[in-house]
């Protein structure tokens, strides 16, 4: 007997988009309309849709689809990953306390400091890999804990289950929030590990083609769903119909994209390690938290970082790559290379980066689905040219 669609495995759920269309279209239509007509004044307040900021049928199909993929009660789609964090932080009050990682994505760090300055929220940063330190940092005064794992771009791993359990034990009201951009729902289920809100930048893997900005918020809690939706509707950060449609389309190939990207990334991690570089990748047994990572995730992901020991050498490697393009972001089908210090994490104060020992020579690779031999040849050639250019000055 066939399973009910709730029981299908995630690789099936991700392709099977449930929707109803009057014309029996196989693919959900794009409702590119701002307004929806009322049958009568009396029915206006009870109809499903009136205005796209409050709700749109294409966005609803996407949200229901993601709820099935993530296996949770509520999903909201908004117009960027940063909008997710903004919606979450909007529900804090002056003097509330946030405990966050000290190597969060640069944009998250910037937004936290903005709310600290503007709205008197107390932000405390800690090394989230240090469990005893995290346990002493999270107290009954902590209102929100913000975690990322593996972190972007240092690839540090956080014990999510232990931290979420501790936060709820010391303060049952504390909201544990997890940024799952690096792993996606295919590799990690933060709500099952005890988090209250899972969000991710769908600009990255979920969409997979670097042609939209989007963010996804997921929760099982009725009270949180209500307060998240309130802010989304009040501020207008809901995802537009066309972008919702593109995200429904991009999502269907997530599983095969990630499979190939992870395979390529693992091969490149070994290649770079054999070249003598210090590589950060959870897929390598040498990663200090390899076992912890695999106790909470189903795969290593497709982002790695490596240090060359010299910033000029790192910059020359990046410049000499041809297939790896020099851009920020990750999660696309094409491979990217970047220097986080001057690119994705440039929004963090230089003094703060130095205090946190952020490696200046760190190169981040976001591995795509190209032919692995071409990727190896591209990096090998770039390293050779870079050493020739920089070598004499080393
Ligand atoms: C880990 C992480 N979280 C959140 C974001 C923010 O997402 P977006 O660019 O879609 O606003 C990014 C990148 O931008 C990221 O790398
Ligand atoms: N100029 C942008 C930089 C975005 S970085 C995007 C991505 N998260 C990454 O890690 O590469 C900004 O100021 O936010």
Image (cartoon, rainbow, N blue to C red):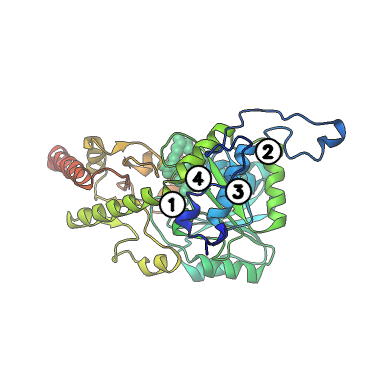
Does residue 108 sit above or below 286 in this rendering? above
Mark 4 near ligand 1 (CB under 8 Å)?
yes
Mark 4 to mark 1 CA distance (whole Å): 9 Å
Q: Earlier in the sequence, mark 4 or mark 1?
A: 1
In primary-sequence order, the first of circles 2 and 3 is 2
Residue occupying the far front of the picture: 1
| The label number, if any, that marks residue 182 in the structure image | 1
Q: Could you give the CA–CA distance between mark 1 and mark 2, rounded to whole angstroms? A: 28 Å
Question: Could you classify mark 3 by the number of other residues whose Cα lies within 10 Å: few (under 14), some (14-19), or many (20 or more)?
Answer: some
Question: What kind of element bears circle 1?
Answer: loop
Camera-side residue of 190 and 115 = 190
Q: Which residue is mark 4?
A: 201
| Secondary structure beneath label 4 | strand
Mark drawn on residue 55: 2
Find the distance from the CA under tag 2 to the CA under tag 3: 13 Å
Task: Answer above or below: position of 82 versus 35.
Answer: below
């Amino acid at each position: 007997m066939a399973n009910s669609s709730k029981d299908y495995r995630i690789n099936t759920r991700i392709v099977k988009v449930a929707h109803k269309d009057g014309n029996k279209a196989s693919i959900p239509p794009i409702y590119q309309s701002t307004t929806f007509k009322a049958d009568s004044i009396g029915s206006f307040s009870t109809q499903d849709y009136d205005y796209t900021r409050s709700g749109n049928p294409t966005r609803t199909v996407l949200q229901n689809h993601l709820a099935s993929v993530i296996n949770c009660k509520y999903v909201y789609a908004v117009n960027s990953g940063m909008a997710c964090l903004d919606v979450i932080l909007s529900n804090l009050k002056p003097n509330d306390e946030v405990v966050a990682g000290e190597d969060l994505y640069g944009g998250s760090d910037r937004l936290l400091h903005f709310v600290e300055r503007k709205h008197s929220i107390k932000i405390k940063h800690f090394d989230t890999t240090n469990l005893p330190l995290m346990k002493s940092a999270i107290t009954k005064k902590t209102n929100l804990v913000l975690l990322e794992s593996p972190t972007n771009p240092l690839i540090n791993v956080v014990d999510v289950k232990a931290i979420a359990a501790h936060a709820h034990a010391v303060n049952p009201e504390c909201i544990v929030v997890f940024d799952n951009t690096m792993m996606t729902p295919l590799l990690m289920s933060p709500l099952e590990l005890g988090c209250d809100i899972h969000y991710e930048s769908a600009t990255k893997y979920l969409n997979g083609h670097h042609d939209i900005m989007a963010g996804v918020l997921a929760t099982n809690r009725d009270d949180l769903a209500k307060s998240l939706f309130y802010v989304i509707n009040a501020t207008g950060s809901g995802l537009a119909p066309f972008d919702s449609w593109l995200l429904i389309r991009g999502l269907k190939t997530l599983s095969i994209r990630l499979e190939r990207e992870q395979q390529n990334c693992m091969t490149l991690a070994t290649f770079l390690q054999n070249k003598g570089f210090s590589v950060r990748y959870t897929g390598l047994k040498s990663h200090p938290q390899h076992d912890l990572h695999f106790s909470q995730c189903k795969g290593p992901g497709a982002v790695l970082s490596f240090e060359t020991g010299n910033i000029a050498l790192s910059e020359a490697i990046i410049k000499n790559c041809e297939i790896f393009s020099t851009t920020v972001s990750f999660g696309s089908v094409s491979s990217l290379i970047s220097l986080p210090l001057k690119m994705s994490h440039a929004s963090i104060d230089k003094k703060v980066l130095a205090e946190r020992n952020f490696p200046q020579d760190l190169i981040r690779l976001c591995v795509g689905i190209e032919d692995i031999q071409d990727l190896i040849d591209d990096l090998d050639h770039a390293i050779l040219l870079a050493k020739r250019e920089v070598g004499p000055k080393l």
